[in-house]
Image: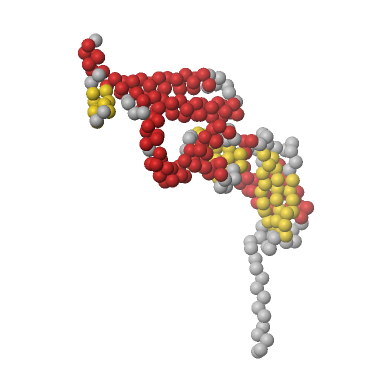
Amino acid sequence: MELLTKFLEFEILSIGEYSLKVSALFLALLIVIITKVILWLVKKSLFRNKGLEVFNQGNTYSLYQIIKYIVWVIAIGFILESIGIKVTILIAGSAALLVGVGLGLQQTFNDVISGVILLSERSIRIADVLEIDGDIVKIQEIGLRTSKGLNTDDISIIIPNSLITTNKVINWSHQTNLNRFRIDVGVSYGSEVEMVIKTLEESAKEHPEVDNNKAIEARLVNFGNSSLDFQVLFYSSTIFGSDRMKSDIRRIINKKFLEKNITIPFPQMDVHIKPNLKE
């Protein structure tokens, strides 16, 4: 017992009045282990129901992330105190340094604050499908500084949280089960408008992922420079694979246009050359 006491009281480091003993390291290690056990128990209790819906699962994940960060902040404070570092003195003494670091890491702090907002506000959840800068991304993880998502090419994307909170983001998962999509197409002038509209609506109806119970509508939207511009609108529950679905419908449209001799024009420009009046 005496040998153990001597071992725990052994000084590893001594600088002036400060000394670091083996017992302090053991206490710090014990705090880390206790913290991990507490977080494990919290996670088990929050996710004990494996049949959670995606909506509730996203809420639970956000709550767990907030609890995890709070617990670790408290644990780090206890660890610093256990090894003889006064947290209050450390914060007061490094105030000027923290200002300088804050200015240098302004964007990082912006991302961290944005992460706290996302986790507490829960406007974005795990498995939500977002449209960010024209890319469709399924959120896999929301961290304190960055979030991780998977795009339609199965490529993992790291997204700074400030990009989500400060930019315009479309959250497709906040919609109902059905979402409306549109496909634009132009045909040559002189084409029969009613036949084009009927062909576009038939093409959308043929795709198995298009909901035929909701109205499928084709419109003449504009008289373009080289074409009559049409738009076909339809509903589908497919979100993450919408690009593939649109591609399939475009192929059907192209096939039907070829069968009915409806031409998709290329850009054209008429050039008028005026004669030289002096000559």
User: Outermost residue, right direction?
Assistant: 194
Task: Looking at this view, name the residue that lies furthest to the top.
Answer: 1
Give residue 57's position: percent from left, percent from top.
56, 27
Q: Quadrant of residue 53?
A: top right
Q: Position of residue 45 (x, y in %)?
A: 51, 19
Compared with 137, 23 (above or below) is above
Residue at x 64%, y 48% (from the top left corner): 250
In-image side of 151 versus 220 (left or right): left
Where's residue 267, x and y in %?
A: 64, 63
Look at 33% across and 20% down and name the residue there: 27
Front residue of this view, candidates 171 and 179: 171
Which quadrant of the rendered structure holds the C terminus? Answer: bottom right
Q: Quadrant of the N terminus?
A: top left
Q: Is residue 183 left or right of residue 102?
A: right
Between 85 and 223, which is closer to the camera in this rendering? 85
What residue lies at 68% left-to-right and 86% top-to-bottom? Answer: 277
Up-down: is 197 above or below 149? Answer: below
* Relative depth, front residue between 84 and 194: 84
Q: Position of residue 152 (x, y in %)?
A: 54, 41
From what the image shows, is residue 35 above or below residue 111? above
